[in-house]
Image (cartoon, coloured by chain):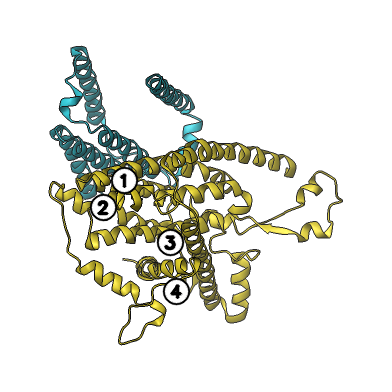
Chain colours: A yellow, B cyan
Amino acid sequence: MDPVLVGKAVFIFLVTVGLFGPVMTWIERKQSALMQDRVGANRADILGLRVIGLFHPIADAIKMLTKEDTVPTGAHRVLHALCPFIAATPALISFAVIPYGGTYTAFGREFNLCVADLDYGVLYIFAIGSVATYGSILAGWAGNNNWGILGSLRASAQMISYEVALGVSVIGMFMICGSVRLTDIGLVQQETFRLFGFLEHFGWIAPGTGWVDAITLPMWGILLQPLAFFIFLGAIMAENKRPPFDLPEAESELVAGYFTEYSGMKFGLYLLGEWTEVVVIAGLVTALFLGGWAIPWVSDVALIGFLSGLVGSDWGNLLAMLVHVGVFLVKLVFMIFFQMILRWSLPRFRYDQVMNLGWKIMLPLSLANILLTGLAMLVVQEVTS
Amino acid sequence: MTELVLFWLFAVVAVAGGIGMLLNLRNTVASALCLVLTMLALACLFVLLLAQFVGVIQVMVYAGAIIVLFLFVIMLLNMERDTLGAETYPVVKVLAAIFTVAVGIKLATVVATLRTPWAEVDEAFGTTREFGQALFTDYVLPFELASILLIAGIVGAIVLAKQRLE
């Protein structure tokens, strides 16, 4: 086995499951407390030491692991045991294709900061995510519980509906980048475009006007495809079934929805999967729409060149790698926080509202987005050629 | 060697899934799950044949969407074999037998005429770009025909649903 590959995989695993997973439970409590003007979790202590409630994730883990694992009578035992794994695994392996940095050459080796730089990058995540549906659709049925089955039905209808809008909304981005590989999409987003360049092409301004060249914007997905960004974010949050799209597990009507009959660590796996998916969503949105690992207006080549000039080629490359991973993590944390703000701000949708939003609003808009993107690309091609 | 082991692994899983689907006719959910197993194994076989894009689409469309819909319908209607009723048209059975035999013969002849060594393929084979290019140039007619078929299915479903509403 290639040690670099193993290292990358371990890094991703530690960051998503080891760091973000547990800390997310704490952040979510603290953040909700902040938004609701409360103090938040601060009771768990080790020898009187409380550290602003940071021990709560540990207490949670111990509680989950030591609770009795109940299997209801009439349940399908095999499927009941299998479902939490089907639900949690996709979130854990999705990160394999999300690049958290570019490619660097140091000490005679090439480092590509993407565990599996697959040609079909984003499609891999969609495929894995669509298999995750089984984790929720079977859970309710396997537990032999009416609330569970209702939750499963809602979950499967919701996940299938939003998969369509999700897949269609990013096609515009694929058209611009000419690739579905996330590292290629990241590289395209490092370039810049002149915001008022079209004035020059139409001949309304003499070429070489200083301020036209000076005002540039990075080619981030959110700037090139703003509509796609909002549709994608909405659809992928609906896929994750967290509020405001949490009607499959609506506690006021369905107890806990499709995982009503789960306890102990099996229940914990559902929560773990959900939280890990929040991190994956943040990573995917960052890679697709927020420029990935790039610092705006500074390309990889420029940064590596600058740092190599300071400390030599090898260390310059490694330093650039650290900077890029840092930048990626900052954007990732921002997107996680954004999702949490939405989670505590919006009330739950009704079932018909969720279906209307997915099929009658998001899908037509994302189809129109493809058409508009195609037209815009043709115009740009005509003008610049 | 690794490829051969993987091939046999996925081939056995695919066939076992198909047989399991038939054996579980009393339990429709288990039957549908066996079909998922077959679809996933087929996707792995596609990847082994360097057709990665087809493999991923296989997981996304068949395992991830179509059979989920099957399960959705089974659970929504709570269908058991008795409520479905027996197949009333003997013609259907005869037609099914004829087509199965025809497809079987075709498959057998294809397998029998296969010769090693296999055709060499270049690096780009099976990538998204190559696949898209082939689909929209050489195979554009079948592609468009398939889309018309799908549109017809969608419109038909809506017409049926509307009738029931009125």
Local packing at callout 2 (Cα closer than 10 Å; few below 14, some 14-19, many 20+) is many
Q: CA distance from mark 2 to mark 4?
A: 29 Å
Q: Looking at the image, which is closer to me, A246 or A381?
A: A246
Residue A361 left/right relative to A155: right
Q: Are marks 1 and 4 on the same chain?
A: yes
Q: Chain of mark 2?
A: A
Work out which residue is located at the far bottom of the displayed protein and give it.
Answer: A47
Chain letter for the residue marked with disc 4 in the picture: A
Q: Amino acid at mark 2?
A: Thr
Chain of the residue where label 3 is placed in the rendered structure: A
Q: Is residue A119 visible?
A: no
Q: CA distance from mark 1 to mark 3?
A: 24 Å
- Helix, strand or loop at label 3? It is helix
Side of A281 where A225 appears, left or right: right
Which is more foreground, mark 4 or mark 3?
4
> Residue B12: percent from the left, percent from the top?
18, 42
> In which image quadrant can residue A293 be found?
bottom right
